Image (cartoon, rainbow, N blue to C red):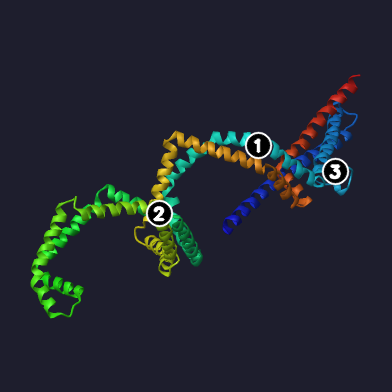
Amino acid sequence: MKRDIDIIRQLDDTEDAIKRARLRTMQAVALGLLVLAALLFTLARWQHGGHPAWGYLEAFSEAAMVGAIADWFAVTALFRHPLGIPLWHTAIIPNSKDSIGKSLGNFVENHFITEEGIALRIRQIDIAGRAGLYMQSHAAQLSGWVGPALEKLMQMADHDKIRCMLREVATRELARVDLSALAGDCVEALVAEDLPQEWLEAALDQLVVYLVEPANHPAIEAMVQSAVNTESSVLKYALHKAMPRIIRSTAEKVAEMRLDRSHELRQRLGAWIANSALRLKGDPAWQEAIGRYQQQALTSDTVRDMLDGIWDTLRARLLADLRSETPSVPAGARRLVENAGKLLTDNPAVRDSLNRSIEAGSAQLVKKYRGEVGLFIEAQLATWTKEQMSERIELSIGRDLQFIRINGTLVGGLVGVVIHFIVTLF
């Protein structure tokens, strides 16, 4: 950026030097004509009384000198005191610096920075269409900045602050979730799809397989003996002898329940699940309890650590992608830029809508900040000294003003010839 500023300054200095040289050249031409008129006047006076043509030359050169000097005075008085003499109403531009700045600011503000003018210009240049073409032709360049920019942002970011911010946002949004109603909706959806009964049938199938497998019988007997929890050897022996029949009978009952969807236990289970859905959505006690568990979970260290890890996970994956041989983020950004540009160029409705939005936004900006433009111009000119103001304007228009001196010399001479002719004629 500093290098660009230095280059701009060098170009400005070069341009000023060229303007100054062209100004000096024209000043020399105007001065040369004045000197030539003086020499011609001297020659004509020396030859006075000779041929009548010398009288016309004398009148021409005399009037030319008057015109040259008068116009020199007029042009010079714009920028400085002629011959350094502070005559009245000279050095007009330096002495009127502040009023010029204010007038220029008001002129630009009232005649250039207008809502209608800016809106008309936006309609003429089709910003959205040009942006679409630029995005398509420069998609690679635009997306190429994404990777380095993201890596730089990752280095500059305050990761502790981002973690805290993400945790607070996630906690706040999760706390707003009506978990009880959500769970009720999920249970209702499962019931509507008959999934609880299907899951129950799958569980019963596996239970039957487990029961009929002889290798599992010792474990089943041990579980029953533990449940009975008796010290009587007689009862233990009786259970041991009856265990095959108990297991077989249980397997038959389970298989019967598996095949009969109208079985009482299955009906009661289905009713309990459906009732649970209703209570999750409408029972204040259940809702209060689930809400309390939800808040406890969100404030637990486990959930807090999990939420804190969101940013670290995202950052690690992003950096890993950016440093890979084929990063997907810049590629995705390129496709996004290309598609957005294509949308703007191929879809007139989108393009016109964006242009109208830009036009409306610019009108609001102009309406809000137009007064600032005039103040800005006035403030910028106020930072210049009188000498700087005079020099900059003279470099811009001074060369053209020298033609006033040249024309004044020639026109003055011609007027002198006309006057001399009229005088000699009458």
- The kind of residue on which mark 3 rests is Thr
Q: Which mark is residue 151?
A: none
Label 2 vs label 1, nearer the camera = 2
Answer yes or no: do the residues labelled 2 and 1 have beta carbons within 8 Å? no
Of labels 2 and 1, earlier in sequence is 1
* Secondary structure category for the residue under label 3: loop
Of labels 3 and 2, earlier in sequence is 3
Q: At x 8% / y 73%, what residue is drawn?
A: 241
Answer yes or no: do the residues labelled 1 and 3 have beta carbons within 8 Å? no
* Secondary structure category for the residue under label 2: loop
Q: At x 87% / y 42%, what residue is drawn?
A: 89
Q: Which residue is mark 2?
A: 283
Q: Residues within 10 Å of mark 1 (few under 14, many from 20)?
A: some
Q: Which residue is mark 1?
A: 114
Relative height, residue 324 to residue 116 (above, below): below
Q: Which residue is mark 3?
A: 90
Between residue 77 and residue 171, name the one nearer to us: 171
- The kind of residue on which mark 1 rests is Thr
Q: Residues within 10 Å of mark 2 (few under 14, many from 20)?
A: few
Between residue 343 and residue 51, name the one nearer to us: 343
Quarter holding the C terminus is top right
